[in-house]
Image (cartoon, rainbow, N blue to C red):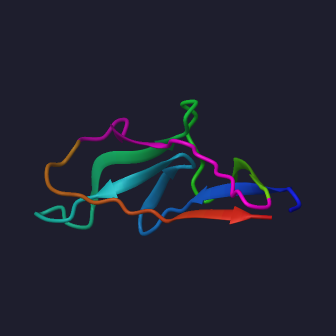
């Protein structure tokens, strides 16, 4: 079989969250008197080199090489980081963060 290489890209979306900066999203309270309001925390995603990703921006994931009988794979670790919003106060209560992750190939 013939061998070929496919470049992969990854995009982290915002989902229902609002952007604080290009690299951070505001988290919101799910209950209590501040329900639906920013809770003073923000979410960022770091790649395996510690670089913060930019939300809604396609980034290179890597190349995958496909051979006749064997399929290739690409593995990369990302870490979600929750930090206080600078200059804000953290509000107690529950929160949730769901963001879409899209992998594309060319």
On the rendered structure, is 78 left or right of 65?
left
Position in image of residue 29 (x %, y %)? 22, 60
Question: Of residues 73 and 14, which is closer to you in this image?
Answer: 73
Seen from the viewer's position, the closer of residues 14 and 2 is 2
Residue 72 counted in the magenta span: yes
Toward which corner of the image does residue 95 lie, by quadrant? bottom left
Q: Is residue 1 left or right of residue 14?
A: right
Q: Where residue 30 sits in the image (x, y, percent)?
A: 20, 65
**Residue at x-position 80% and y-position 64%:** 106
Q: Which residues are magenta?
A: 68-89
Name which residue lies at 30% across and 41% down: 88
The residue positioned 79% from the left and 56% from the top of the image is 67
Q: Splitting the image into 4 quarters, where does residue 49 fall?
A: top right
> Residue 39 at x, y = what percent?
26, 52
Q: Residue furthest left?
A: 32
Report if residue 25 is visible in the image.
yes
């Amino acid at each position: 079989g013939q061998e070929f290489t496919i470049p992969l890209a990854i995009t982290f979306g915002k989902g229902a969250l609002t952007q604080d900066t290009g690299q951070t999203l505001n988290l919101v309270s799910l209950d209590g008197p501040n329900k639906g309001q920013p809770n003073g925390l923000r979410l960022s995603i770091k790649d395996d080199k510690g670089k913060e990703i930019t939300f809604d921006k396609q980034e290179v994931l890597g190349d995958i090489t496909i051979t006749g009988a064997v399929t290739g794979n690409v593995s990369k670790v990302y870490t979600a980081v929750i930090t206080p919003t600078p200059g804000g106060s953290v509000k107690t209560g529950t929160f949730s963060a769901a963001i879409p992750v899209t992998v594309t190939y060319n």
